[in-house]
Image (tube, rainbow, N blue to C red):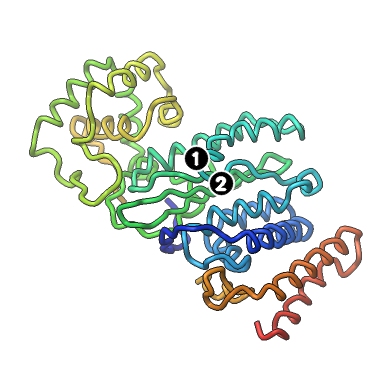
Amino acid sequence: MKRTGTATLPLHGGKAPHWLFKRMQALAGAIISAIVVEFGTAALLKKLSDPFWFQCLGCVLGFDWHSSGLTTTVTGAIKEGIKGQEKELGFFVAGGKGKRSRKTPEELLLIGQRYGINTEPLIYASRLSAKVDNSAVQDGYQLYHHTFFLDIEGRWAVVQQGMSETTATARRYHWLSEKLETFTKEPHSAVCSETTTETLNLVHRDSLNAQKVITELSARRPEENLKDLSLILDSSGLFGSLHMPRRHFQRPDDIKPDRLKKIFLKTYEKQVADFEQLIGTEGVGAKTLRALSLISELIYDTPVSYQDPARFSYAVGGKDGIPYPVDRQTYDKTIEVMKKAIERARIGQKDRINAIRRLITFTRGQGG
């Protein structure tokens, strides 16, 4: 898994007040438009896949500079901020927090029908990216947020987040189609967090042999897998490092063989060709993968792998008053200047987006 850096995201309650979120939408929409006009949608998707750039964007928009809510609020502000401009920008957003995340496939389908985009591979990418981070990487974080960004050419980026009630932290996962070769070998563009739990990482390069064996095991008769699994669970001396205190995901003694029988029967009947097809199978989740990985390690000896944006918060302040309360006058002026700059860029003036650069001078003149 490629990490470009780490950052702790504490779980904070509450939400952005209406007066702030309204401004966040306007400024987010202006920033997104400016990037598309100046650099194109491919560059925008690449920026969104960078956890530090994303964090800086949240700070510039005036949200609490380091809380978990920054992820959900910023993605929501972008989605609302570009409404009505999607066709012009060639850029679209689907998904969101909680129930909205589960509607991502429906939203992608509607986008495809409306703008002539083949969304079948995009829906697959949305599903597999969530499956990997929720089941193939068992790090103690349960996904509750999934946002899918795409452009008219079918390129995409995913920003999704999981929470751990045990550690009171969140973990944000970033994906980018441009760099993605496979969903099952170190697919992330970055992971933004710290974790103290032992992680079962089935998409790490050290897990590739285990992937092959796990896939083969999924095609065995269910009775054989259940027999081997029962032997493991009945043997007290075989757990070793699999004992994971203070963690939020399943332990071996959480696995109930009888409940897995239906899933093993499904994988046996399907006879999947590879690990990616296995994790894409409906019903195959964290417990099934952990059970198969235990059998793989015990019998076949294929162990799996257990392997500064703060300054941007000074742009307009933060909702919690850190580093200082949001300066509404500067915020509104920023939105105004941004919108004017974008309009000038769209009508083809030679200076294009130089007006945005003048914003820096304006902000410094205000003591920001």
| Label 1 – label 2 distance at C-alpha | 8 Å
Q: Residues within 10 Å of mark 2 (few under 14, many from 20)?
A: many
Q: Quadrant of residue 191?
A: bottom left
Instruction: Say few, some or many: other residues with alpha carbon within 10 Å of mark 1 (under 14 / 14 to 19 / 20 or more).
Output: many
Residue 48 relative to residue 254: left or right: right
Task: Write the residue at 28% across / 35% down.
Answer: 290
User: Could you say whether the residue bearing mark 1 is in a helix, strand or loop?
Assistant: helix
- Please state the horizontal and vertical placement of residue 72, each as a whole percent of the image: 54, 52
Q: Quadrant of the C terminus?
A: bottom right
The first of marks 1 and 2 along the sequence is 1
Q: Position of residue 359 (x, y in %)?
A: 76, 75
At horizontal 26% and vertical 31% (from top left) the residue drawn is 291
- Residue 350 vertical placement versus 302 (above, below): below
Choose between 268 and 96: the one closer to the eye: 96
Instruction: Farthest residue to the front: give it.
Output: 18
Residue at x 49% of width, y 40% of height: 129
Question: 301 above or below 58?
Answer: above
Q: Is the residue 312 above or below the residue 287 in the image?
A: below
Give residue 33's quadrant in the image. bottom right
Badge 1 vs badge 2, beta-carbon distance below 8 Å: yes
Q: Which residue is mark 2?
A: 158
Question: In this view of the protein, which residue sits in the foreground, 357 or 254?
Answer: 254
Which labelled disc corresponds to residue 129? 1
Helix or strand or loop: what does disc 2 sit on?
A: strand
- Please state the total of marks drawn on the protein image: 2
Residue type at the position of mark 2: Val
Q: Position of residue 195 (x, y in %)?
A: 34, 57
Q: Amino acid at mark 1?
A: Ser
Residue 318, image x and y in percent? 56, 71
Q: Which mark is residue 328?
A: none
